Amino acid sequence: MLVLSRKKTQRLKLGNDIIVTVIDVSGEKVRLGIDAPREVTILREELEQREEAKAKEKGSESTLLLKRKAS
């Protein structure tokens, strides 16, 4: 993992198409602005984890339904 220090308004470029800008730093919170092409998915990690848990739970429910029908 690359760890960088940035100050307010400073930017960082990822590849050729993505620019991350530090918008604000307040206490322990950092606000970021992300410029990226529309086809690039940007998702906060906690939302991605929630979606994965829902999908996993839904898969478990499907398995239970199949087992009940087979009985």
Image (cartoon, helix red, strand yellow):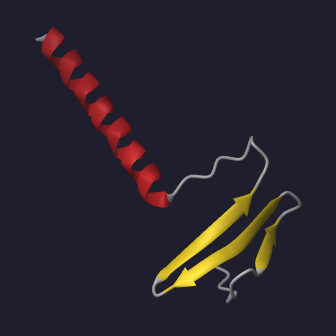
| Residue 70 in the image: above or below residue 27 | above
| Among the 4 quarters of the image, the one containing residue 62 | top left
Left or right: 19 in relation to 27: right
| Among the 4 quarters of the image, the one containing residue 63 | top left
Estimate the x, y position of residue 1 in percent, counting from the top left: 63, 79
**Residue at 75% of width from left, 42% of height from top?**
38
| Residue 28 in the image: above or below residue 50 | below
The foreground one among 38 and 59 is 38
**Residue at 84% of width from left, 63% of height from top?**
15
The foreground one among 50 and 9 is 9
**Residue at 62% of width from left, 52% of height from top?**
42
* Residue at the farthest right position: 16
Estimate the x, y position of residue 46 in percent, counting from the top left: 42, 58
Q: Quadrant of the C terminus?
A: top left
**Residue at 46% of width from left, 87% of height from top?**
27
Number of numbered markers:
0
The foreground one among 62 and 6 is 6
| Among the 4 quarters of the image, the one containing residue 57 | top left
Estimate the x, y position of residue 26 in percent, counting from the top left: 51, 84
Estimate the x, y position of residue 69 in percent, counting from the top left: 17, 10
The foreground one among 23 and 66 is 23
Left or right: 59 in relation to 35: left
